[in-house]
Amino acid sequence: MNQSTNTVIMVRPANFGFNPETAGNNAFQVIDDEAPEIIKQTALKEFENAVSLLRRKGIDVIVWQDPELPIKTDSIFPNNWFSTHSDGTILTYPMFSKNRRLERNQELIDFLIRNYEVTRDYTMAHYEEEGLYLEGTGSIILDRVNKIAYACASERTSVTLFDKWCVIMNYKGVYFESKDVNGTPIYHTNVMMAIGSDIAIICLATIQNPIEREKVLESLQLSGKNVIDITLEQMNSFAGNMLEVSSLDGTKYLVMSKTAYESLTKKQVDIINKYVIPLPIEIPTIEKYGGGSARCMIAEVFLNKKF
């Protein structure tokens, strides 16, 4: 089992824009008076440049086109509604925002079932009826090799569903509270934490309970990760929102935004370079209006191809 994959899915947005439904608990979103059409077209250019960069590095990027209707402003972030796993499982997830539930796309799931070895197509979406949410690998950070799942509490991450997920997938769960400087829960675990094959990036300052903080740190260290502790300021620059991917020849890259990369210290970059090649992509519009960054744009494919 590998921590990273060489095949990913990215969704080309048809109507990217600011989503007021998610802004209530996503402190990273910003709104101003820029024209929606300009935001849409600029985000599309950033998306295409990101895809081109990944492909030039030898990463197999499957681009899925978001249909024009119904309008979905956040379709560019597919990792929140589905995940795939090396045992052949596809999981779909319950989403907090009603308009984001429209992103769940059966055609995409059917595409995966046709082309990959899928042993289990499992959905948790029905828990939306109970007001319980778990937004994929936004809510859950996976140490796939050691089968440890990490999640921080928020409106979008139910401890009840996280526990169920860990039973379904046979993972050990590490659950904790994570808050920003204003005491607001971090909306997604993947903005304060990322795990690669050899390193873990985490903003320990957001875990205010010292017992929980030590529990998380100990779990990461015991699983062999070199822990890079980022500051609150770096987290606000999306330095926690990174994803390790592999090229077809096995080279490992750590995908992050240019904003995140420029927030890192030389010492942090030197540590990262020992294990993986940093791969910054320039996505300021997507970050500003979507409140998500590079990791959020990538859904990993861990399934085996049929042919």
Image (spheres, grey):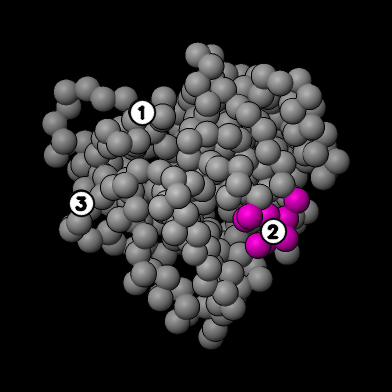
Name the residue type under label 3: Ile
Residue lying furthest front in this view? 130
Q: Dot 3 corresponds to which residue?
A: 71
Q: Secondary structure at mark 1?
A: loop
Whether 186 is among the magenta residues is no
Q: CA distance from mark 3 to mark 1?
A: 20 Å
Seen from the viewer's position, the closer of residues 127 and 181 is 127
Res. 303 image quadrant:
bottom right
Q: Position of residue 175 (x, y in %)?
A: 68, 38
Q: Work out whether mark 3 precedes mark 1 in sequence or the reverse, and give the earlier one.
A: 1
Q: Work out whether mark 2 precedes mark 1 in sequence or the reverse, and give the earlier one.
A: 1
Q: Residue sitting at 16 percent across and 23 percent down?
A: 33
Name the residue type under label 2: Val
Seen from the viewer's position, the closer of residues 6 and 67 is 67
Nearer mark to the viewer, of 3 and 2? 2
Q: Residue sitting at 42 percent across and 70 percent down?
A: 109
Q: Dot 2 corresponds to which residue?
A: 167
Name the residue type under label 1: Gly
Majority secondary structure of magenta residues: helix
Seen from the viewer's position, the closer of residues 123 and 248 is 123
Q: Secondary structure at mark 2?
A: helix
Q: Is residue 83 left or right of residue 229?
A: left
Whether 166 is among the magenta residues is yes
Q: Secondary structure at mark 3?
A: loop
Q: Dot 1 corresponds to which residue?
A: 24
Q: Position of residue 123 (x, y in %)?
A: 49, 64
Quadrant for the N terminus, please. bottom right
Q: Are marks 3 and 2 in contact (CB under 8 Å)?
A: no
Q: Which residues are magenta?
A: 164-172
